[in-house]
Image (tube, rainbow, N blue to C red):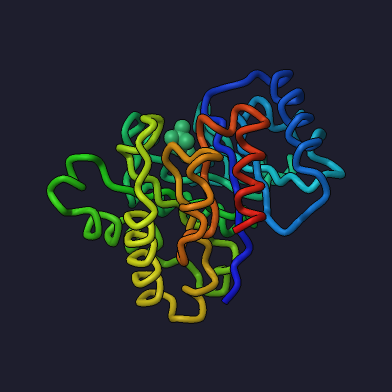
Amino acid sequence: MSRKYLIAGNWKMNKTASDAVDLIGEINSLVGDETSVQVCICPPFTSLSKASESVERSQLLLGAQDVNAASSGAYTGEISAEMLRELYVSFVILGHSERRQYYGETNQTVNKKILTAIENNLKPIYCIGETLEERESERTLEVVRTQVREGLENFPTSSIDSLVLAYEPVWAIGTGKTATDEMAQEVHAEIRSVLTEMFGETAAASIRILYGGSMKPENAAGLLAQEDVDGGLIGGASLTARAFVGIVEAARGA
Ligand code: 13P
């Protein structure tokens, strides 16, 4: 089963809308025309409108960093799937560890958002991963299994082509510490085995599983060479065009 690599930049709470236009311009010119790898940028909500104009007529895809589970209504400060779709947003990052840690998101609340995203033709990038404490107590595989099972409960098999997962070990995010190639492959293979139990072998073999956590041009090739690593979800290194496109190039060469 051949899975097209996806390199997605999670800008987190960085860049104003005008900064975003500049950065997208630089990324665009460095990425060029080759389309063997899918490239997506996920700026903050306030930049999405300008960003959607800037990615027009380019191969860059647009993602958001969250969506509300409800379709509309009295949810002050929240953003709906329909609002994102109008801005040509294709992907939405859901269940990121920062949202779990700082905003109380759980597998159950994220599950509702994933189902809403799918109903509205947004492709979820569902983030999972263990904390340092969980890794040290050898609970990584169990934690990740539960996150996959609970977060993807009732996910419709008919929409499996739209599903992306991202394994992001919490201890590797923004710390400069990266999982070794072997550590990443071990967990990715485990994730794919849970997906096989849930959705069957053919479906599981088609789902992309990204790695995230201090990925940069220097370590990207090794991680992307692993059998079950199908791309990257990039934080810090997605904020400069050269580093981000360096990772895209690593994926093109993998
Ligand atoms: P860093 O690449 O900065 O470690 O962040 C990873 C991440 O959280 C992407 O969602």
Q: Residue 99's x, y, as percent?
A: 39, 35
The residue lying toward the viewer, choosing from 117 and 96, is 96
In this orientation, does residue 59 appear? yes
Q: Nearer the viewer, residue 177 or 126?
A: 177
- x%, y% of residue 81? 61, 45
| In the rendered image, the vertical position of residue 70 relative to residue 123, given as above or below | above
Up-down: is 51 above or below 146?
A: above
Question: Which of the image's four quarters has the C terminus?
Answer: bottom right
Seen at 36% across and 31% down, the residue is 103
Query: Residue, x 64% and y 56% (percent of image)?
Result: 253
Q: Is residue 212 above or below residue 3?
A: above
Q: Quadrant of residue 139?
A: bottom left
Residue situated furthest left in the rendering = 137
Percent of width and height locating residue 90: 67, 50
Q: Is residue 128 left or right of residue 69?
A: left
- Residue 237 as seen in the image, left or right of residue 82: left
Image label count: 0
Please tell me whether residue 7 is drawn above or below residue 236 in the rendered image: below
Q: Position of residue 200 (x, y in %)?
A: 43, 80
Q: Identify which residue is drawn at 34% across, 45% down.
A: 169
